[in-house]
Structure formats: C-alpha cells, structure tokens
Image (tube, rainbow, N blue to C red):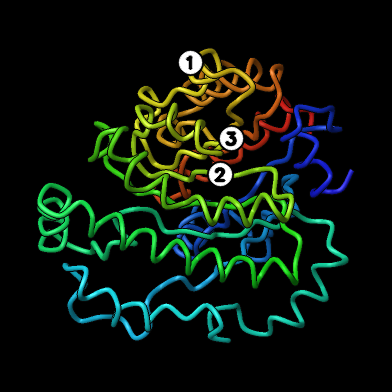
Amino acid sequence: MNSRERFLETMRFGNPDHVPYFEDGLRKDVLRTWRRQGLAADARLSTMFSADRREEIDLDVEPHPSPRHWPSTLKDLKAFSLRLNPDDPFRLPLNWKKHTRAWKKREHVLMMRVHNGFFLTMGVAGWKRFHELMKLLHDDPGFVREMMCLQAEFVAALTERALRDVEIDAAIFSEPIGDNHGPLISPKMYADFVLSSYRPVMEVLKGHHVDTIILRTYANARALIPVLMENGFDCLWACEVNTAAMDYRSLREQYGRGLRLIGGIDLDVLREGKEAIRAEVEGKVPPLLAQGGYVPLADGRVRKDIPLENYIYYRKLLEKVTGS
C-alpha cells in the first residue's frame, strides 16, 4: 500500500498493511543539537525510520487587508465583508495549477486546513480583543453569530473553489479553544455560535466526498466532543494537551468507532527515558491499533531538549509495535 491508501484504509477501520506514521518534521535547532549528540552531519532521519508522507494545503482565510480594529457591531460587518473575497487568487497556495496537476498523481496523504476556529476567526490575538469578545457573547450574541456565519460562508466558497481542482483525504478545522483545564466557552455556546456557523463548510466537504473531518485542537476539548460528533466531526487530533485529560484509550471506550483518532502519545515521556517511553507506547498504542481508526503520533512537535538517544528508541519501538 502507498501512504494514501494506508491512511484511507485506517480511517475506514479497514485492514491496512500497517498504520501510517506521520513525521511532523524536525526544526533545524533540533538537528543541530542532535548532531552534537552524535547524529552524523549527512544523516537523514527520513531514511532512518519508516514514515508516511503527508501534505497540508493551507487556504488563506484571513481578512485582507487585516483590520486595525476588529468589528464589534453589526454595522461594522458590511465593510468587514469586503475583506473576505473567496475569488482572490492569492488565497490559494502559490503555483496552484502546477500543484493540482501533481496532486492528481500523488500517492501521499493530502489534507486541507479549512478553518481557524472560534477565537482566531473573531480576531482574538491578545487580552484586549478576548475581553471584548467575552462581553459581546453576553451583550450582543446576535453580532457574534452573524460574524461567525459571515466568515463561514466565505470559507465555504473558498473551499468549494479549491475542491473543484483537487481531491483531498481529510479536512482540518483548527481549534485553539481553551487550555488544559478545558474550553473557554461551554459546549452549548460552542454548538450555538461555532458549530452552527460551520454548516455551509460541512456541506461543501460532504458534496466533495471528504469523509474524514478532523478537529485539531490545542486544548482539553473533551467537554466539546459530544456536540462535535453531533455536527459532523469524526476525527480528533489533540496537540500539546494534558494527555491524562484527553487520554485516547478512555475516549475510544466512551465514543467507540464514531471518533477516529490521530496522536495521543505524550511527548513529555521522550524527555524522561526509555522506561517511560516503553510504558507510554506499549500501554497506549496496541489497544488502540487493535480497535482501528487510529494513527499513532506524538502529541506535539519534537523540541531540542529531547535527547537523540530517546527519540531513536521511541521511533524504533513504535515501528516494532505497529509492524511498520
């Protein structure tokens, strides 16, 4: 099987030759540190371990030009809407036609990032706008709902434009919705203000037969999972979260095959040594693999404070456990 076939078969709870492993890529500062620890200057980690190639299409869903002051009233939205032109040629990646020709022959996994989630979509980049948004949710919920719907209609049109040219294997909604304690708004509010606005985007994805809809979250989003699943999300990719709160074994026990999973391996154990690594990998990965619909992966990007020896041990152990 090639990487694409392997991923699709895994997401269908089928029988891949082995589950895919996605390499997130290692930054130059990590490699520099590891070379001081013995990694050869010409060594390529991509040839040292098996990995499945994955590519993400990044649609530009930001308002252009970026507003100096984000809208706070319904009257502001008309002018703001002019910044959301789905036909702007610069919203698709450079060399789009060249890429789409190449993607028709691809054997690797192709995903598309289609939405930045609630807070980023509402312009939150610091405390001032966050405080303003929290007041708006209480004082003018109609405005918040209208702004989310306006941007979702724009995203749906842009996604439709892209999917006319390319077939993807999964769509990703990014959602930095809270912290390790949980989401910053309730499940009811999230369903009302956020998930309801996603419907036109979901319709486009469904129309183009995109079967895997991923929520990639950077927070403890466990409380939101029921309303997410009710609104079309069927795959969770939790990054840099408290893995105890988002333990994939308990999530699978609770939600079964309705929720496919990517990630779930606690990156912190790579700092702790081989015994901790073995306990983490052997305790989590085999039972999830046995149930299917799971792609094992560390829950964050590898940092330079992780020793090379530990990383090599982790990757070789993962290959052994998954049969890669």
Q: Are marks 3 and 2 in contact (CB under 8 Å)?
A: no
Q: Residue beneath label 2, please?
A: 214
Quadrant of res 147: bottom left
- In 3D space, how far apart are the residues under numbered discs 3 and 2 (Cα atoms)? 7 Å
Q: Position of residue 14 (x, y in %)?
A: 81, 28
Q: Residue beneath label 3, please?
A: 234
**Quick one: quadrant of the N terminus?**
top right
Q: Residue beneath label 1, please?
A: 250
Q: Amino acid at mark 1?
A: Ser
Q: Earlier in the sequence, mark 3 or mark 2?
A: 2
- In 3D space, how far apart are the residues under numbered discs 2 and 1 (Cα atoms)? 19 Å
- In 3D space, how far apart are the residues under numbered discs 1 and 3 (Cα atoms)? 16 Å
Q: Secondary structure at mark 2?
A: strand
Q: Position of residue 249 (x, y in %)?
A: 52, 17
Given residues 242 and 146, the one toward you in this image is 146
Q: Is residue 324 above or below residue 258?
A: below
Instruction: Please state which of the two labelled residues, at mark 2 or mark 1, is closer to the viewer.
Output: 2
Q: Secondary structure at mark 3?
A: loop
Q: Secondary structure at mark 1?
A: helix
**Quick one: quadrant of the C terminus?**
top right
Given residues 75 and 130, the one toward you in this image is 75
Q: Amino acid at mark 3?
A: Asp
